[in-house]
Image (cartoon, grey):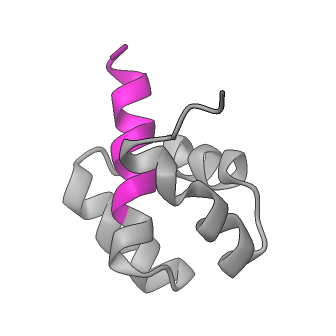
Amino acid sequence: MTETVKGPASYFPSIEKKYGRPVADWQNLIRASPLTKHMELVAWLKSEHGLGHGHANALVAHTLAERAGR
């Protein structure tokens, strides 16, 4: 039985397909950024890297949740 991926990670396959980079690359960019606030990071991914809002939001939410140990 295959478990359905839920939450921000459910966007990961489409992010990798659309932008041609592994999710780990995007997460490394987020971690390396001097920005720390969720919406600042989302805006940065959108303006500097051309991601759509939903994809940027999913990446930031998942990466910040890992940082917080959730």
The majority secondary structure of the magenta stretch comes to helix
Which quadrant holds residue 22? bottom right
Residue 45: x %, y % from top left? 45, 71
Residue 24 visible to an observer of this rendering: yes
Query: In the rendered view, does 52 fall on the left or right side of 21?
Result: left
Residue 31: x %, y % from top left? 52, 40
Query: In the rendered view, does 26 fall on the left or right side of 39?
Result: right
- Was residue 59 drawn as part of the magenta stretch in this picture? yes
Residue 34 visible to an observer of this rendering: no
Residue sitting at 40 percent across and 48 percent down? 8
Query: In the rendered view, does 20 fall on the left or right side of 12?
Result: right
Residue 31 versus residue 39 in the image, above or below: above
Residue 29: x %, y % from top left? 59, 53
User: From the image, which quarter does the C terminus lie in?
Assistant: top left
Instruction: Please state the extent of the stretch shown in magenta in the rendering.
Output: 57-70
Query: In the rendered view, does 22 fall on the left or right side of 46?
Result: right
Depth order, front residue of 57/42: 57
- Was residue 46 drawn as part of the magenta stretch in this picture? no
Residue sitting at 73 percent across and 73 percent down? 17
Depth order, front residue of 22/7: 7
Which quadrant holds residue 28? top right
Residue sitting at 46 percent across and 53 percent down? 59
Residue sitting at 41 percent across and 66 percent down? 56
Depth order, front residue of 12/64: 12
- Residue reaching furthest to the top: 69
